[in-house]
Image (cartoon, grey):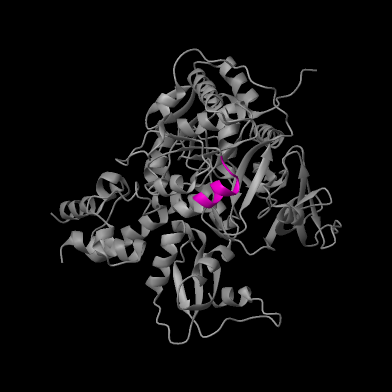
Amino acid sequence: MSAGEQVRQYILENFLFSTDTSLLGMDDSFLARGLIDSTGMLEVLLFLEETFGIKVDDNEMIPDNLDSVNRIAAFIARKKA
Amino acid sequence: MPAGPASLVDLLRESARRHPGREALRHRGVATTYESLWQTVLSASRALRRDGIAPGERVALLIDNSLEYVAAYYAVLHMGGIVVGLNTAMRGAEIARRIAHCNAAALIASPDHAELATVVAEGSDLRCIVAVAATTARAAPAGAVAWGDWLGNGDVSDACAATDPAAPAAIMYTSGTTGDPRGVTLSHRNLVANTQSILQYLELTEADRIVNVLPFYYSFGNSVLHTHLAAGGSIVIENSLTYPHLVVQAMATERATGFSGVPSTYALLLQRVKLADYDLSSLRYITQAGGAMAPALAQRLRAALPAARLFVMYGQTEATARISYLPPERLDDKPGSVGIGIPGVTVEVQDADGRPVPTGTEGEVCARGDNVMLGYWENPAATAKVLRGGWLHTGDLGRLDADGYLTLIGRSSEMIKTGAHRVSPLEIEEVLLALDGVAECAAIGIADEILGEVIKAYVVPRAGATLDSRAVQAHCRARLAVYKVPKDVAFVASLPRTASGKIKRFMLKEAG
């Protein structure tokens, strides 16, 4: 499973309580959809750090890196490059 | 002696007269001066009257913090309407219930809300629907007028009927059950009195500039908005704490003089941001309300921001916002206290019969002053429970010391306090019981390091039913705002109950 698919599955299961992939587009903005609040984002960071072995610095916590499944996937790829 | 302000509009008009060119609001990098804000208020007031909205009618707002929210709010007050700021995190059906409950005549909303179409479809009594500009690609609902077109062009007039300070000005919905909405109804006098009291003890002036993350539809954010506009200060709107360091960065670059938050705001900032890396030397004060902050967290906060005075405060929506504050110089000799009544407000601790208890004795915290609400909108039974004997009965338990300083001990009500939100367990239980396979249930708040409390649901399944926690959470997510969805679901064979059948919530809380 690709990193993007893993992230989508995690968001679906933990924030939409579903496995129906049609509920979350790869480019859907978490902020605009009201899916993830400030503490939810902490849970996402923990998931990313544990699952992909990356460390997210404070200055990397920006919408460009984290506000959709595809943005997170690209961010993981950059971190691991 | 000149007459005092009759409404918040008088305070804003005065700020616009004194400092027309000063910045009132900044949002997404765009500044709005007092003069520009005032003209927008007058345009929106004219538009409401043109559309046949009469004084006393309700106008609902479904907009995140923005210029449009602020202008619409003051415009409704200006034309004598009653403004209803709705929680944008709620699901469509929750919002539609509130719009129906107050029988709103107009709705000013952002298409950013994913279920605006549902809200509009159910709001058949709405005579006027205005859509502000969306930040997403979502289209405005059919029948809605675009904000800019609605405001119209041409000269505007400040002429309006005189305001009765005792008339209802705003309704703020607090958490009740789905069949029992609690619309806290505030008069113009309530809003003016609380604004002026807060101005006095925070010593706000036109030099003040706050980076605000609190939603204006809650009483805490509402008070931040009105106090700053009355002082002629400025508000930098940051609508999300999802990226906490961006908020701190804004505090540094905007040279913020103040910041306000609930305990979870500060827990999050301290956990995720190295505050020492930012130049926050302009910050002269920080305020905290919205639930007791653990003394250890308060200490860490003071250590991280030693130059800023920390105001610990207490209040509730039924008291407009604020009831008491702890003067910062008393933090060390009154640890854990929420302080003394704000100017114009008397705090008393009473026994079950409404008599004041002796110093140091526990009882129910009661408040009296011009900040106490008129009542719950069209809910005399609920109003009579909390407005008794000339006092607001807060439902909070506390004691006063010999110097009159209040310490809260707990809540006599069972409200769950999670982050900035107050949630009625009954509302969650009603939704849970609607799920096929649920025989009995209870929702409680359990301790959480960041949020103070998170919601846990105990569910007794019907015989033969197969339920899993994800299905329970998905059912709630479809019907409730995200912050009301239980973070944890436990399946049990039975619930502990008293002899009269009441759920023993304290036993569930102890079990965690």
- Residue A33 as seen in the image, left or right of residue B353: left
Residue B283 seen in the figure? yes
Please state which of residues B350 and B159 is positioned toward the viewer in this rendering. Answer: B159
Please state which of residues B413 and B293 is positioned toward the viewer in this rendering. Answer: B413
Membership of B98 in magenta stretch: yes
Q: Position of residue B107 (x, y in %)?
A: 50, 38
Where B456 sits versus B282, above or below?
below
Task: Look at 75% across and 38% down and name the residue there.
Answer: B370
Q: Position of residue B144 (x, y in %)?
A: 41, 35
Residue B141 is drawn in which quadrant? top left
- Residue B49 as seen in the image, left or right of residue B195: left
Membership of A69 in magenta stretch: no
Residue B314 seen in the figure? no
Q: Main secondary structure of the magenta part?
A: helix
- Residue B434 as seen in the image, left or right of residue B111: right
Residue extending farthest to the left is A81
- Residue A55 as seen in the image, left or right of residue B381: left
Residue extending farthest to the front is B124
Q: Position of residue B269 (x, y in %)?
A: 44, 49
- Quadrant for the N terminus of chain B, please: top right
- Find the magenta span and give its range: B96-104
